[in-house]
Image: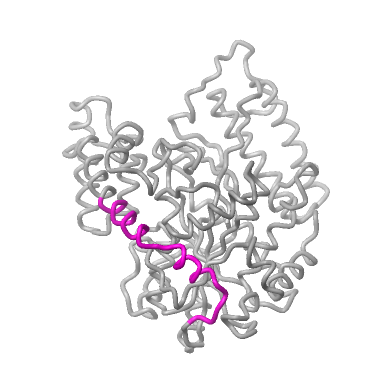
Amino acid sequence: MTDCQGDGEGTMSPMELFEKLNAQGEKVRSLKSAKAEKAEIDAAVQLLLKLKVDYKQMTGQDYKAGCPPSENLIVSNNGPAADDCDGEDLVDPWNVSASSTKGVDYDKLIVRFGSSKIDKELLERIEKVSGQRAHHFLRRGIFFSHRDMHQILDAYEKHKSFYLYTGRGPSSEAMHVGHLIPFIFTKWLQDVFDIPLVIQMTDDEKYLWKDLTLEECHRFTVENAKDIIACGFDVNKTFIFSDLDYMGASPQFYRNVVKVQKHVTFNQVKGIFGFTDSDCIGKISFPAIQAAPSFSSSFPQIFGGKKDVPCLIPCAIDQDPYFRMTRDVAPRIGLLKPALLHSTFFPALQGAQTKMSASDPNSSIFLTDTPKQIKNKVNKHAFSGGKDTVEEHRKYGGNTEVDVSFLYLTFFLEDDEKLEKIKEDYTSGALLTGELKKILIETLQPMIAQHQERRKQVTDEMVQQFMTPRPLNFKF
């Protein structure tokens, strides 16, 4: 699965960016008038929206056709504009940027992607079918959108098993706390429904997209697998696999890859993912590899050749383009469409307008950080929703919608009542920013220390056990 990597327009002048916007707008109009494929139009619109966000950040002004930037414009290098703007959010598997300091507008994203909101009715049904209270990620809207979750629950109620599929793109040795979100939630799903799980490590993808050797990518897979295993997955129900290893060892997996490849055209993949003629052919063929684990027949050692075991994929919503493609292809190759549960993005310390970057050590809390590093990062870099002075803050209160310390607590503080009290106190001004940061530090330090202790217990032999193709212990 991919990680977000920025691709800004920082080397362009405002006028060059304005001209590029004009050209992209013209391209969108041409595609629409030519009745091009929807996927191709969507990709062109996404690029147009990204350029608009870049233009707003560079100039402080909204782009308007026919209104070029002033020649004596002072270009800001201070990052995203502080105020909300009317622009659109950019979300794809490699880029995430929001037009508002509140972060991505997920309601708009649901409409744009055509998924369904996880509503009160679905939450109640998950609780009824599982016999468990919904995970706080569900209760708080961190997992907020789905595709076909009702069908998964229908199957489960009829005593038909399903399986989970999630993944990790191993681009660095150390993972950050944001990387844990899908795994924490996937473990809860595995425990509650007592079902098998496959975890794809896309080391091949990282080799294609990043300046890394194959050996480095494979080593990062093993190191990241240790962090994933430390989340507490059941080895008897979990198969972790490296694409670089498993593709060559499983004819059935590769056959599904080839079936997908045959049924997706070059135009479609360019439209969905924005690939250009200068991208290597490995990138163009990769989406089929991320699609293949959605099909139970890709894992004969687990499912005995069955093609009809439904798949549920918990992932961040930027991965959805891969699975829209997969769901489109599945019926044409005689296989089941995967269902999905989408999460929001875990914000960077600097604010909710972008995801974190593994290449910027100050943009996140890493799983290797010491208690002192955690304290320093939160105190120095966590974006505050508080006021400029204590007097103002006491009078007007803070904004929990943009305050990163509070946003992090919504992910990691499990006590609903305590979280609500913190929100009330911060919004009223009774709780200061420094005090809120202290609560976050005291929440993160033991959590990460415990993770580090569990990781130390994970041996190379344990990793090998998880990564060996084998039958898993579950009931069909």
Q: Is residue 420 above or below residue 390?
A: below
Task: Name the residue at the left extreme.
Answer: 430
At x 76%, y 70%, the residue is 259
The way the protein has been coloured in the rendering is: one colour
Instruction: Please state the horizontal and vertical placement of residue 288, each as a whole percent of the image.
Output: 70, 62
Q: Which residues are magenta?
A: 446-472
Instruction: Please state the horizontal and vertical placement of residue 28, each as a whole percent of the image.
Output: 74, 42
At x 19%, y 50%, the residue is 421
Q: In the rendered view of the protein, which quadrant contains the N terminus?
A: bottom right
Drawn side of residue 222 relative to residue 243, left or right: left
Task: Name the residue at the top extreme.
Answer: 72
At x 75%, y 50%, the residue is 270
Task: Name the residue at the right extreme.
Answer: 34
Q: Nearer the viewer, residue 427 or 290?
A: 290
Is 453 included in the stretch rendered in magenta?
yes
Drawn side of residue 439 relative to residue 240, left or right: left
Instruction: Please state the horizontal and vertical placement of residue 381, each as a whole percent of the image.
Output: 36, 33
Drawn side of residue 438 relative to residue 179, left or right: left
Is 147 included in the stretch rendered in magenta?
no
